[in-house]
Image (cartoon, helix red, strand yellow):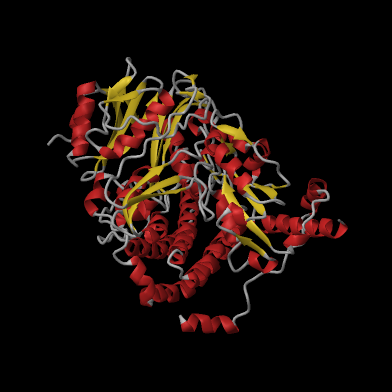
Amino acid sequence: MRKLLFESVFRPPLTERAPSPDDAAVAELATALGQAARKRLGRSLSIREVDAGSCNGCELEIHALNNAYYDIERFGLRFVASPRHADVLMVTGPVTKNMRDALERTYHATPNPKWVVAVGDCARNGGCFAGSYAVVGGVSEVVPVDLHIPGCPPAPIAMLQGLLALLESADASAVKS
Amino acid sequence: MPSLIDLTLEGRKIGQYGPWPRVAVDASVWTFAASELAHGRWSLLGLWGEPATVHMAIMDEQTAEIAVVSLDCPDRTFPSVGRHHPPALRLERTINDLFGLSAHGSPDARAWLDHNRWGVRFPLGGRIDALPKAAPYRFLAAEGDGLHQIAVGPVHAGIIEPGHFRFSASGETVVRLEQRLGYVHKGIDALLAGANLARGVQLAGRVSGDSTVAYAYAFSRAAEVALGLAVPDRAAFLRALLAELERLANHLGDIGAICNDASFALMHAHCGVLRESVLRASGAAFGHRLMRDIIVPGGVSRDIGDGEAETIQITLDNIRLRFPALVELYDNTASLQDRTVDTGMLKPSLARQYAAGGYVGRASGRSFDARRTLAYPPYDSLRFDVPVLNEGDVNARIWIRIREVEQSLSLIDQILSGLPKGPTRTEVPLEREAREGMAIVEGFRGDILVWLRLRNGLIETCHMRDPSWFQWPLLEAVIENNIVADFPLCNKSFNCSYSGHDL
């Protein structure tokens, strides 16, 4: 173990430079966020991930955000274990009817101010599962959505762009108010 | 002792999937098959429904013979297999939820996937209105002094899929765990009915995201069996390349994640880097990090050139360089071994009874690996070992993964060096009359079974059985007498799919 730790002192870090926030995501946010005040939160954001019916593909790429290449915590973004600790809900999947109630309850357990990020194509409108007897549809059918990150699944870099846009946009609105 | 062939001679032959027959049987032969399963002479591979029929896929593990027996249910009931052979119980509950065909004599008539939220009952059968009010789910009782219950989920603490776990604990020790699943049921069977093959393989690739390659592989092979289609050699090799890259990425991720659940973050960080390197190489070679929508009926939708092959080879070389140090780290960290050795023991007899596939079965003495036992191409021409251990603990499930990482590295070498030249896709013919097919493919988690019937180029009906169906119940068994704090370890060492199970 010591050897591995020692090596990491000399090897250059794997972590990549921050991507510039995605333009489309910024534009979507500017309208979505409005004047929401966020002064008291500072820059760090706690994220609670909710799988509302996904195939688990999006979860794999959300997991990747924590690896050394993307290292999401350096931006003050971290995943927390309870919605009660969260500022942001990242919701994946077409919302299934069996998960609708749990998603609503998770949303209500999250203190204000809060944002909802819908992750993946299914989270927009149900994707390829739309129309099934067991599927409600997109996340916005159940809880209000502030930002949508497309992809099947979105690559980690696309999610990072979206979340950074969320941070910047929230900061900007905090300064304005 | 009757052989599977003797059994199938008792019925009327309806279909043939390569070497595997499907026969219609009467209730007495059906019940006889159930009792043979119960006596451990055969293994249950799948049990599924149609609006007025139930099908059961069984295998003789000695001879690797496989057959499907089918029973018509004119009075909407069939003799329960689960009353003799518990691995069938959840499958029977699902058949009742979806088709309204009830298993006569079943000791467990509770709903399984149906949480009374769909607005409809028996969505694939008679379709009647849902009950006005859902009855509370009756968890099995656990009684005794000082027992308490811990209810977890469906929303869990980590970034994982939803499901409910009900623990009954005595102090720290788990007395009983009962799972309740079905939260991510998306009604995929219903979406498949009437779909064309392109949409079918798209949906198959989204049954369980971590096995997107394996599902597209199994679905495509089932369709090809139905249509009597042979794919070009190059496509067969590329499919195996995709499947081994998927296995490699998942095993690397799992090895780190299991250690992380013992709070050993260093392994997690380093394994995460190796996993990411596989995903990046896959993305560079096939245009998608998880290699989604590459395998299609008739072949593969994308070819690779020398540059892509080199990218993969460089990634492999790097893993070969870095992985042994991580294996050594795992093997020499006593505090980590203290958590994994003897934790979550799965007895070989249970693994055999449930025909548990993948690392769950192979860590408990069951050597089945569809790549070897069923030897579908190109695995019949590749050299690889199937690692098997008998200990059955978390440690053994980690070691099976470690050995399989090494085997996958070797397989990818062989595939890249022996990649045949030629086309990667063949035209899929349109067949007017009904054609059935079945295929079993080894995903990283275990064997995936797909059965389907095509008519006029469309899917009439399709069933996909995830390996998790026979692994989830075993997780309930292995956690008994372990402490609550070891549940994440046991759970991650199984890494069952919720989405693949709930479908």
Identify the residue at the far front of this view.
B145
Residue A170 x, y percent position in the rendering: 78, 56
Residue B441 x, y percent position in the rendering: 40, 45
Residue plotted at (59% across, 63% down) = A66
Front residue (pair B341, B74): B341
- Residue B372 seen from this side: no
Q: Is residue A50 left or right of residue A41?
A: left
Residue B60 x, y percent position in the rendering: 23, 41
Q: Is residue B311 left or right of residue B126?
A: right
- Quadrant for residue A159, please give it: bottom right
Front residue (pair B414, A143): A143
Front residue (pair B366, B88): B88
Q: How many marks?
A: 0
Residue plotted at (32% across, 46% down) = B374
- Quadrant for residue B494, please give it: bottom left
Above or below B201: residue B190: above
Above or below B42: residue B307: below
- Residue B246 seen from this side: yes
Above or below B336: residue B439: above
Front residue (pair B159, B110): B110
Residue plotted at (25% across, 49% down) = B350
Residue B459 x, y percent position in the rendering: 50, 27
Q: Is residue B232 left or right of residue B141?
A: right
Above or below B418: residue B162: above
Figure quadrant of the N terminus of chain A: bottom left
Identify the residue at the far right of this view.
A176
Identify the residue at the far left of this view.
B1
Figure quadrant of the C terminus of chain A: bottom right
Identify the residue at the far top of this view.
B74
